[in-house]
Amino acid sequence: MKFSIIVNGAPWSSPAAFSALKFAEAVVESDHEIYRLFFFQDGVHNGSAFAVAPQDEVDIPKRWQALISKHKLDAVVCAASALKHGLLDAGEAARYDKDGHNLLPGFDISGLGQLVDALNQADRVVTFVN
Amino acid sequence: MILHTVNKIAPCLDRCMALASPEDTILLIEEAAYAAAGNDSARHWQKFPGYNLCVLEDDLAVRGLSATMLPEFSAVSWLDFVALAASADKVISWG
């Protein structure tokens, strides 16, 4: 069975980001698969390469990146949310004349069409909200 | 069967229970885990006999509630959560 997981919470701001991460880890551990991870609204911060986790706390963006890399997951960061929250890949940084970019490798910036596709193609959709 | 996940008590839990059917499964996660323990919560759930009530065991444990979980509830793991979602017709995430 294919799951899409929508993540609306930023790391450490609410339990949502860590809950989504634990759920995603459980899906890949089970007999099911992940069709897409979609990071929306404040959830785009899960894809930040510039976040520095305290030493005694879980590095949530790094753990997402490890999961995405290991299982070759499709991880999409909402474009409109990303730009508003200062999450840029190299292409967006060049387009908007910004000095740096901070999207972790493994995440892709794309539009809400990818959310609609995730809702249509997955057998189950689970959302983690602030 | 619909799986309802609820991550806060107010206002999410009341909104969920106003629409949930007795054949649905209610899964309390995050801050809503507090509603699966204690005497005030026990009185609340008396209004919903026969519902399948679950709470995420990790969210109970980190709040120190494991020992006082109400008998109406089943504590579930993350893998159980995945299985509940897979066995449901759909999932509604209240938050």
Image (cartoon, helix red, strand yellow):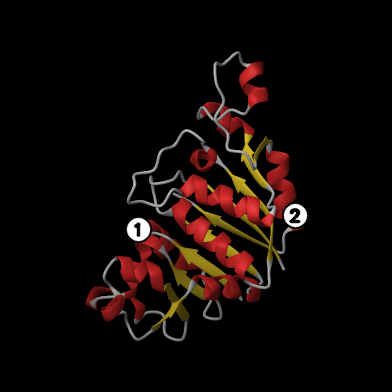
Examine the image and state in which quarter residue A108 appears: top right
In the current view of this chain or complex, which residue is farthest to the left? B39
Residue at 46% x, 86% y: name it: B50
Mark 2 or 1, which is nearer the eye?
Answer: 2
* Residue B19 tag number: none
Q: Nearer the viewer, residue B52 or A130?
A: A130
Q: Is residue A124 left or right of residue B75?
A: right
Q: Is residue A128 above or below residue A94?
A: below
* Circle 1 SS class: helix
Local crowd size for mark 1, using a 10 Å CA cut-off: few (<14), some (14–19), many (≥20) = few
* Circle 2 SS class: helix
Residue B88: image location, x then y, percent: 63, 74
What's under tag 1, amino acid-wise?
A: Ala
Q: Is residue B31 above or below residue A9?
A: below
Residue at 69% x, 64% y: name it: A33
Q: Is residue A79 above or below residue B76?
A: above
Q: Is residue B8 left or right of residue A7?
A: left
Residue A8: image location, x then y, percent: 51, 46
Q: Is residue A105 left or right of residue B59?
A: right
Residue at 60% x, 31% y: name it: A80
Q: How much space separates mark 2 and mark 1, taking CA atoms? A: 31 Å
Mark 1 sits on what residue?
B10
Which quadrant would the N terminus of chain B be assigned to in this image?
A: bottom right
What's under tag 2, amino acid-wise?
A: Asn
Mark 2 sits on what residue?
A120
In the current view of this chain or complex, which residue is farthest to the top? A97
Chain ID at mark 2: A
CB atoms of marks 2 and 1 within 8 Å: no
Q: Is residue B66 above or below residue A47?
A: below
Q: Nearer the viewer, residue B92 or B67?
A: B67
Residue at 42% x, 85% y: name it: B49
Residue B56: image location, x then y, percent: 43, 71
